[in-house]
Image (cartoon, helix red, strand yellow):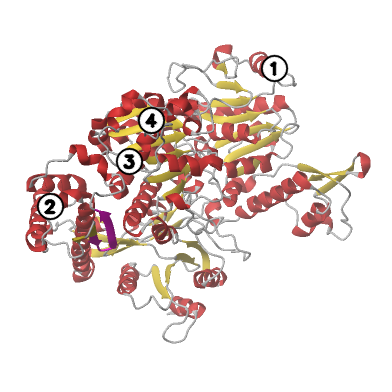
């Protein structure tokens, strides 16, 4: 069974939190509640698709290429079904951009052993069915009540304005579907009707009645022109989009950064980019790089056969597929059996499993792009000798070489990177072009900068995998409309620029190394359009690469922090809730009641009170509850309600007997003391489940707090720090969801970029004070909820992640938690302060903890507070 990565679990947690809130407070208020404080999300007001579907949750989950969007979409079905749709058997319309992707997704969802299929088996216990949209007539009324039905379609399949056979079928009357409509007395106004006013037994009407979950995969390919009309026809219960590059009006609920994918070992980064003067040199170096990687791969525990993707030019140009093939065979001595050509006319990859040990394909030649959905993580090297007019083709090919084999970091660090060899005549400004393509793939601007390492061609002759501090930036050139005035520049700056006159008064600038901002601005004034943009982008990339050389993380400077541990009779482990709750807790020790839960009948509706608010349901349930009139369920017994709740509450730390006893006593109490019959409990079983979940969490937190206090503070001798359990920041593991973009330049941050810090406000001022402190050697802006990539301390509710970690010049570590003065008096913040003091006391003089505020009780600002702690 495939284990989800931390960022995938977090994405699903946020989605579930949002949909649970939307069930109670509505789509708009839930979005503002959940997305507003989500790191990496540039919050904007919620935008409903239209007034007609105002209350339909409509959100976007943003993941870069390689993040596993389709796998997450598979898991999202169960989250939406139980958190919002109140069903174990949802109807799902899964929409993708093309027929090719539809077929590949369909096959993966149906294939036993595939992670997508495994996810469905895990969540729906084999009670599911996956259909192509052409198979919708196979759906029977009983199928919609007994299993999850997932229907895959393309965007074009249900556009009213398109006209082909498949689209007409979606809107046409079908005798096979008439049983779905025969016993429904009150059909809604949104259904299509024939000329006589009779409702059509069409698939679009079936969707409208049953309000499917709509999954939009690769949503950036969605033609939004028809979205409102299309969605109103479908009448969805909720819409979840998955994309790398959301549209400007998307309701981005959660954002995953490329650095998170890198930290979770999903993608290869950085990209080692080398520009060559000729296409022959580009191919030759690609062959050399592949051979070096092959030698390293033979030492790996897993089978890896590095593959080169070569992008040739079209038939009417110079470096065609035939030319590239001939060069590989005749000049590089590559056996033709090791080469596959993948073009419209030659499909030598069709039916080939590149992961098979018996395959000997090492070079793949294509022209524009490989077929959609083609994935082979053995692809390591992109070699392009083609003119890159099509950004989409470059983006697609680049995405092919980024996926990490087996989604696990390799021991040989060279196998954790991707490589690009391009010929300068075709790629005039390669670094800028690849930067743009990475942004199109879901990287932010800073991540795109961080992901490119420019190499000089001559460094390839020896070994291209040297230390970054020794790398020399390649020469680049730009064509200007006129010559800039360099007369007042210092001699060392002039030496970096060579000017060559061109015809028509133009000049060519050849630039070595990194220019000053003054020299850069003088040249920029003589450039126009794309040339000017590429120049500015290239210079910014060079400044970044030059600056990062002095960064402690890049230099490999260690940064380890003592962690708080438990010593239990000689067994030492990091302090966590698992240890201080290991003695177990019993739910039956708490009153069997749901204090915030109540169901009241009022006129033609039910009012259901939960701790988070009130849900109002008509007597017949939600909008199309009349669909159930022909097949009313037999009322459940007490045992059936207990069994259902037990199977859906998923409490791994509770004994089943204890949980079942608590459930039984509670539903009896609801029936006997509050007058909520078992029939009503059954009707609102999903809301009852939510109430139970909230109650169990409440009891668990209380038990956890008692265990926490007893473990950490009642028995001080068992708490310690231990060198074997130090937390260590590593150079490749800083998965910030958003990067600091302010004008102030931080000089001491351990990593090249500062993560998840606004460019103004009290925390920003605190960061500046840390950066300017003469006692501090370097520091880190700690990340929230990134367990394997951040330092944390235990609290009764789980973990807390101090805002800043600083390494002092005297060798000590200062942990700084900053809080606004209005928050200091909160119990949760007092607990953090106590844990911090305990950590300092147990650090054996190696740690300091500062609970910083704008002004402390003595009137000291942050600078004074740090000074007092360091010198105390």
* Picture disc at residue 202: 4
Q: Mark 3 points at which residue?
A: 187
Q: Is residue 652 left or right of residue 91?
A: left
Mark 4 near mark 2, Cβ–Cβ under 8 Å? no
Which residue in the protein does label 1 denote?
A: 323
**Residue 603 occupies which quadrant of the picture?**
bottom left
At which x and y percent is residue 503? 92, 39
Q: Which residue is drawn at 67% across and 40% down?
A: 433
367 with respect to 696 (left or right):
right
- With respect to residue 175, does 448 lie above or below? below
Q: Nearer the viewer, residue 205 or 278?
A: 205
* Quarter placement of the C terminus: bottom left
Please identify the residue farthest to the front as the structure is shown: 196
Q: Which residue lies furthest to the right in this view?
A: 504
Q: Residues within 10 Å of mark 3 (few under 14, many from 20)?
A: some
Q: Give the range drawn in magenta.
A: 608-618
C-alpha distance separating marks 1 and 2:
70 Å
Q: Does the magenta stretch include residue 613?
A: yes
Q: Mark 2 points at which residue?
A: 659
CA separation, marks 4 and 2? 45 Å
Going from the N terminus, do you reach mark 3 or mark 4 first?
Answer: 3
């Amino acid at each position: 069974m495939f284990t989800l990565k931390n960022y995938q679990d977090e994405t699903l947690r946020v989605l579930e939190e949002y949909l649970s809130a939307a069930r109670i407070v509505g789509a708009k208020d839930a979005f503002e509640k959940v997305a507003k404080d989500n790191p990496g999300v540039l919050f904007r007001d919620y935008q409903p698709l239209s007034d007609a579907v105002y209350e339909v949750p409509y959100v976007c989950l943003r993941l870069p290429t390689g993040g596993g969007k389709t796998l997450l979409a598979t898991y999202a079905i169960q989250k939406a079904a139980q958190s919002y749709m109140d069903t174990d058997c949802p109807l799902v319309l899964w929409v993708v951009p093309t027929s090719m992707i539809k077929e590949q997704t369909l096959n993966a969802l149906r294939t036993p052993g595939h992670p997508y299929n495994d996810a469905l088996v895990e969540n729906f216990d084999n009670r599911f069915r996956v259909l192509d949209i052409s198979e919708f007539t196979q759906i029977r009324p009983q199928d919609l009540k007994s299993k999850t039905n997932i229907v895959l379609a393309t965007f074009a399949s249900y556009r009213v304005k398109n006209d082909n056979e498949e689209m007409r079928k979606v809107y046409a009357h079908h005798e096979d579907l008439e049983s779905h409509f025969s016993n429904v007395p009150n059909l809604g106004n949104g259904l299509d009707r024939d000329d006589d006013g009779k409702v059509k037994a069409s698939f679009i009407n079936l969707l409208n009645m049953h309000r499917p979950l709509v999954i939009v995969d690769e949503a950036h390919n969605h033609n939004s022109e028809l979205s409102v009309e299309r969605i109103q026809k479908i009448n969805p219960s909720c819409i979840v989009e998955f994309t790398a590059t959301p549209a400007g009006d998307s309701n981005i609920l959660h954002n995953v950064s490329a650095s998170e994918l890198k930290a979770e070992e999903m993608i290869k980064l950085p990209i080692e980019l080398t520009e060559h003067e000729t296409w022959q040199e580009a191919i030759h170096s690609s062959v050399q790089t592949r051979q070096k990687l092959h030698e390293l791969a033979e030492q790996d525990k897993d089978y890896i056969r590095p593959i080169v993707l070569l992008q040739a030019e079209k038939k009417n140009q110079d470096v065609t597929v035939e030319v590239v093939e001939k060069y590989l065979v005749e000049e590089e001595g590559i056996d033709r059996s090791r080469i596959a050509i993948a073009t419209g006319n030659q499909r030598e990859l069709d039916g080939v499993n590149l992961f098979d040990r018996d395959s000997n394909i090492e070079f793949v030649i294509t022209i524009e792009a490989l077929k959609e959905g083609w994935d082979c993580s053995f692809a390591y090297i992109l070699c392009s000798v083609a003119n890159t007019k099509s950004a989409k083709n470059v983006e697609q090919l680049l995405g092919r070489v980024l996926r990490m084999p087996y989604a696990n970091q390799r021991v040989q660090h060279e196998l954790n990177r991707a490589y690009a060899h391009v010929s300068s005549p075709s790629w005039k400004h390669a670094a800028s072009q690849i930067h743009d393509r990475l942004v199109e793939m879901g990287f932010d601007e800073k991540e795109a900068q961080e992901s490119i390492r420019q190499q000089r061609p001559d460094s390839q002759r020896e070994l291209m995998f040297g230390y970054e501090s020794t790398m020399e930036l390649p020469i680049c050139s730009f064509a200007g409309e006129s010559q800039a005035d360099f007369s007042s520049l210092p001699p060392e700056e002039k030496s970096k620029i060579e000017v060559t006159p061109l015809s028509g008064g133009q000049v060519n600038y050849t630039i070595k190394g990194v220019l000053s901002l003054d020299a850069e601005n003088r040249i920029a004034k003589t450039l126009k359009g794309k040339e000017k943009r590429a120049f500015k982008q290239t210079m910014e990339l060079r400044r970044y690469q030059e600056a990062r050389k002095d960064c402690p993380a890049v230099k490999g400077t260690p940064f380890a922090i003592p962690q708080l541990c438990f010593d239990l009779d000689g067994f030492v482990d990091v302090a966590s809730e698992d240890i201080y709750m290991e003695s177990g807790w019993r739910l039956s020790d708490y009153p069997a009641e749901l204090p915030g839960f109540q169901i009241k009948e009022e006129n033609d509706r039910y009012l259901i009170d939960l701790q988070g608010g009130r849900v109002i349901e008509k007597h017949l349930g939600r909008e199309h509850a009349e669909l159930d009139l022909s097949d009313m369920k037999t009322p459940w017994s007490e045992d059936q309600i207990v069994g259902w709740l037990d199977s859906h509450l998923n409490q791994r730390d509770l004994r089943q007997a204890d949980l079942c006893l608590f459930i039984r006593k509670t539903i009896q109490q609801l029936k006997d003391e509050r007058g909520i019959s078992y029939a009503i409990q059954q009707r609102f079983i999903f809301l009852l489940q939510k109430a139970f979940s909230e109650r169990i969490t409440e009891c668990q937190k209380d038990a956890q707090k008692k265990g926490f206090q007893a473990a950490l503070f009642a028995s001080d001798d068992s708490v310690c720090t231990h060198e074997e359990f130090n937390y260590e920041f590593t150079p490749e593991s800083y998965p910030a969801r958003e990067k600091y973009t302010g004008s102030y330049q931080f000089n001491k941050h351990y990593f090249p970029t500062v993560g998840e810090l606004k460019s103004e406000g009290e925390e920003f001022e605190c960061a500046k004070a840390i950066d300017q402190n003469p006692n501090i050697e370097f520091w880190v802006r700690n990340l929230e909820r990134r367990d394997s990539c951040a330092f944390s301390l235990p609290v009764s509710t789980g973990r807390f992640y101090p805002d800043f970690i600083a390494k002092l010049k005297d060798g000590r570590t200062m942990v700084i938690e900053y809080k606004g003065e209005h928050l200091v008096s909160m119990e949760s913040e007092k607990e953090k302060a106590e844990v911090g003091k305990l950590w300092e006391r147990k650090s054996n003089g190696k740690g300091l903890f500062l609970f910083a505020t704008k002004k402390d009780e003595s009137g000291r600002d942050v600078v004074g507070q740090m000074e007092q702690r360091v010198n105390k």
